[in-house]
Amino acid sequence: MTIPNNPQSPAKTTYDIVIVGGAIMGSSTAWFLSDNKDFNGSVLVVERDPSYEFSSTMHTNSCMRQQFSEHLNVQISQFAADFVKNIRDYMGGDDRVPELSVRSFGYMYLANHEEFADVLRASQKVQLEAGAATQLMTPREIKQAYPFYNVDDIVLGSINLIDEGYWDGTAVFDGWRRQAQEKGVEYISNEVVAMSNSKDGTRVQSVTLKSGDVISCGKVLNASGPRASRTAKMAGIDVPVEPRKRYSWIFSAEQPLDQDLPLTIDPSGVHVRENGGGTYQCGGHSDVDPAVAYDDFVMDFEIWENHVWPILATRIPQFEAIKVQSEWAGHYAYNTFDHNAIMGPHDEVENFFFLNGFSGHGLQQSPAMGRGTAELLTYGSYRSLDLSPFHYRRIPDNKPIVEKAII
């Protein structure tokens, strides 16, 4: 990833849109705004850490799937696949933008009881109706196609081998950020530390930066990942998003598998996928899953020894002899209300917009969510996918979206 050399102070004292957070969601929105001929406003992106070292964007598995239980979530990932496979066309034929693809090894959901098997069956119907190619597999079929699995406890599997797997999220992120800046979006290395509302509380009038600069704004977009709640509180708003720690490991196998490993979601919640060259990437978290401090990225080494490795070795016996090559902890921007995106305007502070709470599937949703948010900020409505079911209003109305395929 190219680390930008952004200035600390903004060039102006007022902007039409201030985006708080310049990682994948902020940069997606910034690029779609800059690419829209109907938008002629000024945009400031404020990013506290231009290295993005601890951002969720840099800690992601960089995979996409269409296996969701909600039709709209399937459509969102379908646009992501189309965008990635045609990225150079979307980005104006820029030959600096690499030709990308989706390495479609698929996601393999494994059910070890009938209740979850019924969820997979119902979800497949939704996915097929949306045009996905999800297949249900009996344990015997799984074993025939993927002999390395232990399926003794499995009753059903679900996989989709079209537009479901790994993609280069960093390349997309780099392209969005670079082109947005070239088209006039201003990025600064600073931090929003306060906001000032109008007397009646219906608008954010200005944001104050850590440097002391005060910026007047027409609209504010909260794209600050796991820090979403902290950003919202500056405007007097509560949003149910908190950082939850997620652990990742890359390991090599003494006996590598002789075919691609789908991104396998074990019934335990541990997941593992192909990484290439005889290496694999897996992830998981502890059974106790509290909110953590924004700067807490400390590894818990016992999770690997006592939880993750035993599960891997049971599900894939060839993973009895493996060696960890690297490991890290990252944060989900976890929506405690319903684990889905929180978008749209606040119901009282009308010029404060959300792009938060993706709970682990943000990277794959970033093309559609950035496009939709840019449309909403430009036109006041959506012109492509109607993303209004994700609007903040559902939270005070207590109308959660029940997505059954959260990892």
Image: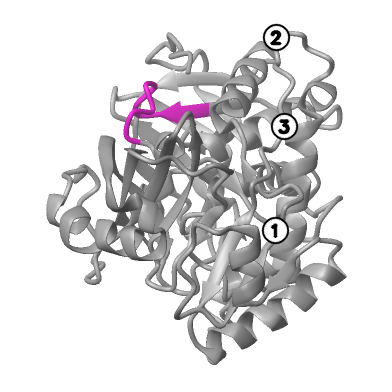
The spot of residue 268 in percent (x, y) is 37, 71
Q: Is residue 328 above or below residue 362?
A: above
Question: Mark 1 — residue?
Answer: 66
The spot of residue 165 in percent (x, y) is 63, 46
Between discs 1 and 2, the one toward the N terminus: 1
Q: Are marks 3 and 1 in contact (CB under 8 Å)?
A: no
Residue at screen point 50% across, 13% down: 11
The spot of residue 38 in percent (x, y) is 85, 32
Query: Is residue 142 at least partly visible in the picture?
Result: yes
Q: Secondary structure at mark 3?
A: loop
Residues under labels 3 and 2: Cα distance?
16 Å
Residue at screen point 32% across, 43% down: 249
Q: Main secondary structure of the magenta part?
A: loop
Q: Secondary structure at mark 1?
A: loop
Question: Mark 2 — residue?
Answer: 96
The spot of residue 21 in percent (x, y) is 46, 36
Query: Is residue 358 at least partly visible in the picture?
Result: no
Q: Is residue 308 above or below residue 30?
A: below
Between discs 3 and 1, the one toward the N terminus: 1
Residue at screen point 56% across, 60% down: 341
Q: Which mark is residue 101?
A: 3
Q: Is residue 127 above or below residue 202?
A: below
Residues under labels 1 and 2: Cα distance?
29 Å
Residue type beneath disc 1: Gln
Which quadrant of the structure image shows residue 350? bottom right
In the image, which residues are magenta?
A: 45-54
Q: Is residue 51 magenta?
A: yes
